[in-house]
Amino acid sequence: MKNKKDEAAGLFSNMINMAFLVGIKLDDESRDDAEYSVLELERLVETMGIETVGTEIFPVRKRNAALFIGKGNSEEIKQLAENYKADCIIFDHDLTPAQQRNWEAYTNICVLDRQEVIIDIFAGRAQTREAKLQVELAKLEYKLPRIKSAWSHLSRQKGGNKGTRDAGEKQIELDKRIVVARIAKLKKELEKVRNSRTNMRKQRVQIPLPTCSIIGYTNAGKSSLLNNLAKADIFAEDKLFATLDPTTKSVKLGNGTELLMTDTVGFIQKLPHNLVDAFKSTLEETLFADFLLILIDISDPWFELHIQTTENVINEIGAGDTRKLYVFNKIDAISCEELAEIKETYPDFSYISAKSGVGIAELKTTLENTLAESYENETFCFNYNQQKELIEIKKEGIIENEEYTEDGIVLKASVPKRIIGKYKDLIKK
């Protein structure tokens, strides 16, 4: 169980054990989308170690400034939370700081929104320095406009002189200055870390090797797949956001080609914008990949929505034009009949079980073919002083023939299309 301190949960510091979840259906949303979003929130809450004692979805046509939801539904939510003996209400939507304070005053129990739940989970999962900095930044940006509620108990404590501000107001201003200063420092530290990541990426390009980013919904099995392909031991667990930090490993394919594969942070619906921004450097790995491997959990009944969410994020970060390879994972978790039906709908997708290894050999062949489609067969002519260029071509390409002549070295090789321009002057006319 999580002990939600004032910093994360507003006015209350009691242990949260049981939560009542409030789903929201806006006019531009379908009932199915609202239901799935609440199911996803329930999994997020479970990841926090909190039991869900009840859920209810409420339609919202006009947003109430004070409570987001109208008076009648607000009274029903309060009553349901009391009936379920919940010690927390969690909204599947972002609340303004004022709305959150009003709800806590109205119900006298802790009130959280979806954004705070996700930030809390990210905070518990961050391992590397970069991830910890990113999460702290997101947490402080969330906390800054909510500082007022932390000192509302001082609102009646007036200063000794007429016209002076009360103690709560002074403390609020002091806290805000501290938080603003910390946010500025975190942004500077993150910029240094991102510069370091850029330098590491440049070094990888100089190696150089083809690259692939594994992306997809959280808990689709990205780390498990990379473990299987690279014979690695990356932490993998059946939980949402089990890993947040990108990990790059070398994968050797059957034709001798070496591929650098990166496991990226998982996607989710309604990911808070400040977390999208905070993890932008992590997601930037996808922008520099030769192609993307989109991994989908076939056992999840909402997998089509997962595909759409993933593609939306890909487009949002500017990687929409990158070549994509779609792979269904966890095929051993559904029936043969279900699998056959899905294969009819998605005949061009790959089908695997990263856990058992089923389909991995076929996937490697697909990876080889995908790389082959981005290669060209060329004949290069090097003089004997161009050893550096020769070595680079050998590292990048698949060598078919190498011949030593009086004038130099003639090399027939299949090389990535992306580097043809770099060596066009060496191509035999």
Image (cartoon, grey):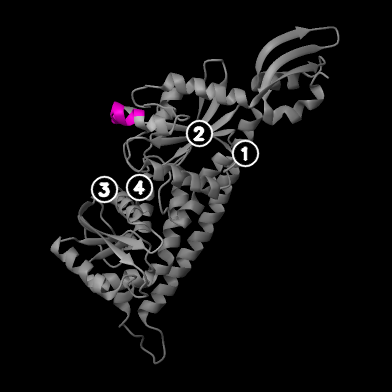
The residue labelled by disc 1 is 199
Q: Secondary structure at mark 3?
A: helix
Residue 413 image point, x, y percent = 69, 16
The residue labelled by disc 4 is 124
Q: Which mark is residue 262?
A: 2
In-image side of 40 versus 428 (left or right): left
Magenta stretch: dominant secondary structure: helix
Q: Quadrant of residue 353?
A: top left
The residue labelled by disc 3 is 46
Q: Which residues are magenta?
A: 333-340
> Label 4 amino acid?
Gly
Q: Residue at horizontal 60%, vertical 45%?
A: 195
Q: Is residue 198 above or below residue 174?
A: above
How far is disc 4 from disc 3 in space, using C-alphas? 13 Å
How far is disc 2 from disc 4 in space, using C-alphas? 22 Å
How far is disc 2 from disc 1 in space, using C-alphas? 16 Å
- Please tell me which of labels 2 and 4 falls first in the chain: 4
Residue 341 image point, x, y percent = 35, 31
How far is disc 1 from disc 3 in space, using C-alphas? 39 Å
- Between residue 261 and residue 64, name the one nearer to us: 64
> Label 3 amino acid?
Glu
- Between residue 148 and residue 258, name the one nearer to us: 258
**Do residues under tags 1 and 3 come within 8 Å of each other at their CB atoms?**
no
Residue 134 image point, x, y percent = 47, 51
What residue occupies the far bottom of the structure in this picture? Answer: 162
- Please tell me which of labels 2 and 3 falls first in the chain: 3
- Between residue 85 and residue 278, name the one nearer to us: 85
Q: Secondary structure at mark 1?
A: helix
> Label 2 amino acid?
Thr
- Please tell me which of labels 2 and 1 falls first in the chain: 1
- Please tell me which of labels 1 and 4 falls first in the chain: 4
> Label 1 amino acid?
Asn
